[in-house]
Image (cartoon, rainbow, N blue to C red):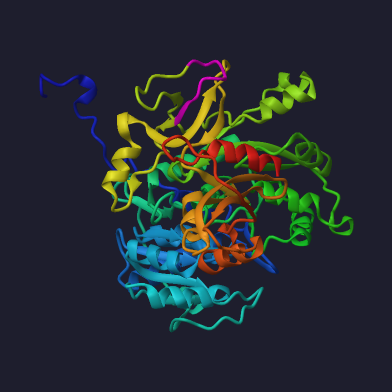
């Protein structure tokens, strides 16, 4: 024995008996072993049990492997909340490749950039998105193998872009495909792109360890008992559905797929499938509450609803409670696997006056159990700000559910991790009880319907119009969407253009959901150095 080593270090090494890399892939394997006949996926009239879910995921992995897909290869998917998206969350990483889920609302230019930047080898795409994907592929430099998905429950007539059909591709795979856990739990599992505040979006890389831990933390945070029924209103392309595609397998729950977010479909599925949990942006609450009376259903039990983005107003929370939903506010970013902060409600707050309860609910909250540390720090000194609820600082994260970094962008990665913390760019305060509350976004990101919109990106489009001399875009509060882009524009001398014409111009040059909903023509407020005072515009937007 080495006399220089502690007894706790001698002969106590890692081996196959006492160590395995953490990976969420193990959750599905266990669910299939223990609850093979439990319904895992509901999609239209389809019912898929865990035995079949696991088999099909292995077949997908097998077929991808036959194409030569392996470690660190990128498989991109353009899919809505349909069964193949769930299968991809297991089948792709079973080959040790990286899953790249694309936002189905993006325009062709951004999609092409992502395909190229990710070095896409295989693309699985729904025929619903054939027009935009065809254009994107014509722009992109990469030439991936294209696999078309035809939804048997909700047929789409978009043209086929490849030579392979998804169902045939899966069926050609080996149901006994011998997959293994990652060589290292730090290996990449997925790639998600931010909206990008300047220039092109950044590719956020997740690892198996973080996905495993955040998936478990979701179950704890949501107080999920065994066999929950989860309705997919949150897009799975968004931070891998906040890791819930993996969370539900932990408790052998049921995924209820939802191809399109429609009030009638949501109410019917919630009632008919006995849904217990769902996640979504404030727009989902508005859609449910504003549905015609004849579409609403009486619910047998209270449904847990988890929302992010701007905290909903007290009137909405009260209406949701009456409708049968208990709303919990979460906060996070793409860089921390989705939600990593929760407004953990304390029972003694129920006795507070409603106004004080609303103040409590407006706060983002405390760290997830899987997050090691959450602080509001001075961005220059990294000293904690006073916990007085008024001193502004930057919200920073530290722990296992922080991204590996930005793909092919060491400078941005270094900046994000400066001083040993992940810098969120969000400004907030720390309250005396340790709960944080956001006050502003230093990145000027607008969160509309749960989607991040870069104000700078919208401004860049506005500046392309010859009539625009100066432009600034800020968030305008919106009861339905949470926030919408509001543009303040100074026109060039002699120019004449209407609000509708300028909005139409923006829609021609970017994804429609990013275009401003409101345009105000005015002289922009500026500092003595000529910098536009966005804080003044934000206040003005609130009054519109």
Q: Which residue ends up furthest to the front in the rendered image?
A: 494
Residue 78 vertical position relative to residue 309 in the rendered view, above or below: below
Residue 487's x, y, as percent? 58, 51
Dominant SS type (magenta) = loop
Residue 283's x, y, as percent? 69, 50
User: Is residue 141 visible in the rendered structure shown here?
Assistant: yes
Residue drawn at (67%, 25%) of the image: 360
User: Is residue 177 visible in the rendered structure shown here?
Assistant: no
Q: Which of 119 and 200 is in front in this view?
A: 200
Q: Which of 85 and 87 is in front in this view?
A: 85
What's drawn in magenta, residue-wise?
Answer: 386-395
Residue 197 covered by magenta stretch:
no
Residue 473 vertical position relative to residue 327 in the rendered view, above or below: below
Residue 394 covered by magenta stretch:
yes
Residue drawn at (24%, 30%) of the image: 12
The quadrant the C terminus occupies is top right
The quadrant the N terminus occupies is top left
Residue 78's x, y, as percent? 50, 67
Q: Decide if residue 205 is on the left or right side of residue 331.
A: left
Q: Decide if residue 268 is on the left or right side of residue 122.
A: right
Residue 168's x, y, as percent? 49, 79
């Amino acid at each position: 024995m080495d006399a220089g080593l502690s007894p706790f270090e001698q002969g106590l090494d890692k081996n196959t008996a006492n160590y395995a890399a953490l990976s969420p892939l193990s959750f599905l394997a266990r669910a299939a072993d223990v609850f093979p006949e439990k319904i895992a996926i509901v999609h239209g009239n389809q019912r898929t049990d865990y035995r079949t879910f696991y088999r099909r995921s292995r077949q997908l992995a097998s077929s991808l492997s036959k194409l030569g897909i392996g470690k660190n290869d990128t498989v991109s998917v353009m899919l809505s909340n349909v069964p193949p998206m769930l299968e991809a969350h297991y089948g792709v990483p079973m080959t040790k490749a990286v899953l790249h889920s694309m936002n189905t609302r993006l325009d062709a230019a951004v999609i092409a950039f992502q395909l190229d930047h990710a070095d896409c080898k295989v693309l699985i795409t729904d025929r619903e998105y054939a027009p935009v994907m065809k254009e994107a592929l014509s722009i992109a430099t990469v030439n991936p193998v294209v696999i078309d998905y035809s939804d048997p429950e909700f047929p789409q007539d978009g043209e086929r872009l490849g030579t392979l059909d998804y169902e045939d591709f899966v069926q050609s795979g080996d149901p006994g495909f011998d997959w293994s856990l990652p060589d290292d739990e730090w290996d990449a599992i997925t790639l998600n792109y931010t909206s990008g505040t300047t220039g092109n979006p950044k590719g956020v890389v997740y690892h198996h360890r973080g996905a495993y831990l955040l998936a478990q933390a979701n179950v704890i945070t949501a107080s999920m008992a065994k066999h929950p029924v989860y309705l997919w209103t949150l897009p799975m392309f968004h931070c891998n559905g906040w890791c819930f595609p993996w969370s539900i397998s932990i408790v052998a729950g049921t995924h209820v797929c939802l191809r399109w977010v429609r009030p009638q479909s949501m109410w019917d599925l919630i009632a008919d499938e006995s849904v217990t949990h769902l996640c979504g942006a404030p727009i989902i609450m508005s859609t449910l509450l504003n549905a015609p009376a004849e579409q609403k259903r009486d619910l047998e039990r209270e449904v847990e609803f988890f929302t992010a983005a701007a905290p909903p107003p007290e009137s909405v929370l009260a209406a949701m409670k009456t409708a049968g939903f208990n709303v919990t506010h979460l906060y996070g970013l793409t860089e921390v696997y989705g939600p990593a902060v929760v407004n953990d409600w304390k029972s003694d707050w129920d006795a507070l006056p409603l106004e004080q309860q609303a103040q409590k609910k407006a706060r983002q909250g405390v760290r997830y159990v899987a997050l090691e540390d959450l602080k509001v720090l001075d961005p220059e000194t990294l000293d904690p700000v006073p916990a007085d609820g008024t001193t502004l600082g930057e919200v920073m994260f530290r722990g296992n559910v922080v991204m590996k970094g930005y793909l092919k962008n060491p400078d941005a990665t270094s900046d994000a991790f400066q001083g040993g913390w992940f810098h969120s760019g969000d400004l907030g305060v720390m309250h005396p009880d340790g709960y944080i509350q956001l006050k502003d976004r230093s990145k000027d990101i607008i969160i509309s319907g749960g989607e991040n919109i870069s104000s700078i990106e919208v401004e860049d489009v506005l500046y392309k119009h010859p009539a625009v001399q100066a432009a600034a875009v800020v968030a305008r509060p919106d009861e339905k969407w949470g926030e919408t882009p509001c543009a303040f524009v100074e026109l060039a001398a002699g120019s004449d253009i209407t609000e509708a014409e300028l909005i139409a111009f923006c829609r021609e040059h970017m994804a429609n959901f990013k275009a401003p909903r409101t345009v105000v023509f005015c002289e922009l407020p500026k500092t003595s150095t000529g910098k536009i005072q966005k804080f003044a515009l934000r206040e003005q937007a609130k009054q519109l």
